[in-house]
Image (cartoon, grey):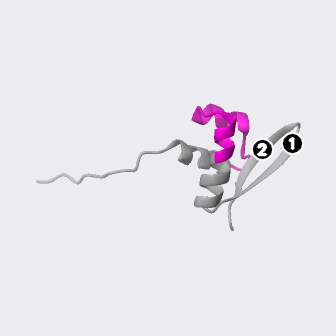
Amino acid sequence: MTKAVTTQKPTTKLDGLEKLLKRKSGASIAEMITATGWQQHSVRGAMAGALKKKRGHSITSAKNDGTRRYRIEVAQ
């Protein structure tokens, strides 16, 4: 009897960043830094390069109570 082998793609930091940005409340730069362990310029670069250009997401930002929060706009 053979066992079915399931292979899952490991979750990357970029996938985690995308998940944070898809939340209704979005994420602040500080939250993204904590989640990934990256520096601020790396988080911004990942949003601009990998998420916007390569994955085609539309990222918006809004400043509420002095904190800028970023979100991926989900098409409905």
Residue 2 horizontal/vertical position (percent): 14, 54
- The residue at 66%/49% (across/down) is 47
Q: Is residue 44 magenta?
A: yes
Number of dots carrying numbers:
2
Determine the CA span between mark 1 and mark 2: 8 Å
The x and y percentages for residue 63 are 86, 44
- Which residue occupies 60% across, 48% down? 19
Quadrant in the picture for the N terminus: bottom left
The image quadrant of residue 76 is bottom right
The residue most toward the bottom is 76
Q: Residue at x 60, y 49 (%)?
A: 18
Q: Nearer the viewer, residue 38 or 17?
A: 38
- How many C-alpha atoms fall within 10 Å of the one at disc 2: few (<14), some, or many (≥20)? some
The residue stretch that appears in magenta: 23-45
At label 1, the amino acid type is Asn
Residue 48: x, y in percent?
A: 68, 52
Quadrant assignment, res 32: top right
Sooner in the amino-acid sequence: mark 1 or mark 2: 1
Secondary structure type for disc 1: strand
Q: Which mark is on residue 64?
A: 1
Give the main secondary structure, helix, strand or loop, of the magenta stretch: helix
Q: Residue at x 65, y 41 (%)?
A: 43
Q: Classify mark 2: helix, strand or loop.
A: strand
Identified by mark 2, the residue type is Arg
Mark 2 lies on residue: 69
In the rendered structure, are the residues bearing label 1 and label 2 in contact, judged by CB atoms less than 8 Å apart? Answer: yes
Please check the rendered image and state whether residue 36 is part of the magenta-colored stretch, yes or no.
Answer: yes
Q: Is residue 43 left or right of residue 15?
A: right
